[in-house]
Amino acid sequence: MDISNINKDELIAKGKEVTDAAYQKSLEVIEKTKIRFKLQEAKTQQRRAYLQLGKIAYEQIKSGDIKPDERMQSAESEIDTANYTVKLLMRELNELRGAAVCPKCGALNPERAKFCSECASPLHEETENK
Ligand SMILES: [Zn+2]
């Protein structure tokens, strides 16, 4: 198109239109970012609340206050398995750090301790003598 045929006012109007559109677009981007942020916050809150409810339910299943259905039982045994794994890995890690881990209750004790400070179980096999 021949730009010399367009008068100045039209050109300004056109420019304003483009600027307004760009401005509108950037407002939309900001709005979307805000919403995404709030969504993320809400999801975190949601997850935390579910987790809290799950922990309460787990404790109540363990104490016998709740009679779990099949789905709850399956989740319960998943948690049990994970807890066991966590305990084992923590023990491994702590042993690597040099702490004496009680084989009975899992409590951490000083490396040279002979008995557990929590449950008084012997910490090492009694066969080794120096
Ligand atoms: Zn112990």
Image (cartoon, rainbow, N blue to C red):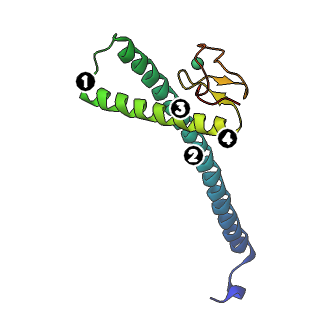
Give how far apart the Cα atoms at labels 4 and 3 are: 14 Å
Residue for point 62% across, 49% down:
33
Tell me where residue 8 sits by quadrant.
Answer: bottom right
Could you say which is closer to the camera, residue 116 or residue 21?
116
From the image, tell me which residue sits under label 1. 69
Point out the residue furthest to the left here.
70
* Viewer-side label of 2, 1: 1
Q: Which residue is mark 3?
A: 87
109 vs 88, left or right, is right
- Numbered mark located on residue 36 in the image: 2
How busy is the neighbourhood of tag 1: few (under 14 within 10 Å), some, or many (20 plus)? few
Residue 43, how many percent across, how many down? 51, 37
Q: Residue 47 placed where, x, y %?
A: 49, 33
Q: Which of pointers 4 and 2 indicates the residue nearer the eye?
A: 4
Q: Amino acid at mark 2?
A: Arg
Lower sequence index among marks 4 and 2: 2
Marks 3 and 2 in Cβ contact (< 8 Å): no
Depth check, mark 4 against mark 3: the one in front is 4
How far apart, in angstroms, are the residues tagged by discs 4 and 2? 43 Å
Nearer the N terminus, badge 4 or badge 3? 3
User: Given this view, does label 3 or label 1 mark the residue nearer the observer?
Assistant: 3
Q: Which residue is mark 4?
A: 96
Marks 3 and 1, how far apart in space? 27 Å
Question: First in sequence: mark 3 or mark 2?
Answer: 2
